Amino acid sequence: MTTGLCILGSTGSVGRNCLRVVKNLPGRFQVVALAAGKNLGVLAQQVAEFSPRIVVVGQGECVEPLRQRLLALDYHKPLDVLAGVEGQIQAVTHPEVNFVVAASAGTTGLMATWEAIRAGKRIGLANKEVLVVAGELVIREARARGVELLPIDSEHCAVHQCLRSGVPREVRRLILTASGGPFLKTARKDFDAITPEQALRHPVWKMGGRITIDSATLMNKGLEIIEAHWLFNVPPAKIDVLIHPESIVHSMIEFVDGSVMAQLSVPDMRIPIQYALTYPDRLAANGDSLGLDWVAARRLNFRPPDTRRFPCLGLARDALAQGGVMPCAMNAADEVAVEAFVAQRLSFTGIPRVIESVMKRTPRVGSLNSMEDILESDREARRRAQELVSGAQSAGR
């Protein structure tokens, strides 16, 4: 049976690799819908190659330019061109869509993923912010609808695979691995001078801008702790992080008897993407070889993270401990701070300072009652973060 796919964030790193997987498994998938932002050149090429029924752009002003690009490619097949969140929702709820790949950056795809769950679609989750900002609501709704959330992040995909070796009551702890980013050996005194160009040079993975900066600050690992908590129903105290520069062990599970199960592979996103798309089957990887060269690997190194040098990891744990809207506020502040850093309006060390300040100014709230609560908290946290960035810029920090 052919699976109808909708890919949110098709022009990003995960989206492009997802389409590579689809191409290498002919006949198994039909691309029904593609959604992207403003990268119209890549999007037009994807439409021409995969012939979706629907394509969604970030804003209405991009609709006509995309049509013109498709005409330039001599593409005349029937196609609905939509825009914005409403367009994304129409795409994910299309009757021919069985599987939604949520790979939009940041909170962009939150509402579309939410509506896909409410429509009973199977979800391949690459956008960790969905669970970071709204984990309580999303998991509750997914369970009520019987919707399976299959992780595409390499770390959570690794945990998912390792959990097939046992049952939840046998798990002592989860161990998420982190490459450590480009500044693992950089002296703390030099952090203020770090430039966006340096932070965007990840030593292992090729990813989007925000996630690459988050990897440099270790915030990405903090977000993954929150995501793992919701995905696998594991208390935060049982989720640990180890720095593993080689990025070959993607995560581990320690069982109560002392046994450890680890998932190892070359650092290539096609592996977790294919696992999620074809689960519970495990298919041969067509195309380029993705096998692990054990002789070349030779040595695997591990060390605990230094939260004094990388305070974002601790901030994420604090946000999860406080619960309610705090993870949402933390995530919004991080998005604003990272954007300001990339635009050279904030220093590298200013990122955790802005996040911590926003969290201190965010009132603690208990259980979340609606997606409207989430969106309002997100807006308010962004407003506070923008004020702090402007203040830091005026002060020359």
Image (cartoon, rainbow, N blue to C red):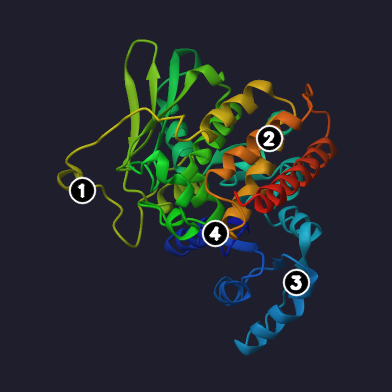
* Amino acid beneath label 2: Ser
Quarter of the figure with residue 316: top right
Mark 4 vs mark 2, foreground winner is 2
Q: Please give the residue where the numbered disc 1 appears in the rendered image.
A: 293
Q: Earlier in the sequence, mark 1 or mark 3?
A: 3
Contact? badges 2 and 3 (CB < 8 Å): no
* Picture disc at residue 157: none
The amino acid type, in three-letter code, at marker 1 is Asp
The residue at which mark 2 appears reads as 357
Residues at discs 2 and 1 in contact (Cβ within 8 Å): no
For the point 68% across and 45% down, the residue is 121
Find residue 115 and report its horizontal and vertical position in percent: 76, 46
Q: Is residue 371 left or right of residue 128?
A: right
Indicate which disc, 2 or 1, sits on the residue closer to the N terminus.
Answer: 1
- Can you identify the residue that label 3 sits on? 81
**Disc 2/disc 1 C-alpha distance (Å):** 46 Å
Q: Is residue 131 visible?
A: no
Residue toward you, 272 or 202: 202
Of pointers 2 and 3, the one earlier in the residue sequence = 3
| Earlier-in-chain disc, 4 versus 2 | 4
Amino acid type at image mark 3: Val
Q: Is residue 75 visible?
A: yes
Q: Is residue 389 left or right of residue 299?
A: right
Furthest toward the left, the residue is: 295
Which is nearer the eye, 29 or 384? 384
Residue at the (58%, 30%) spot, across then down: 315
The residue that label 4 is drawn on is: 15
Secondary element at image label 1: loop
- The relative height of residue 245 versus residue 341 in the rendered view (above or below) is above
Relative to 32, say whether 378 is above or below.
above
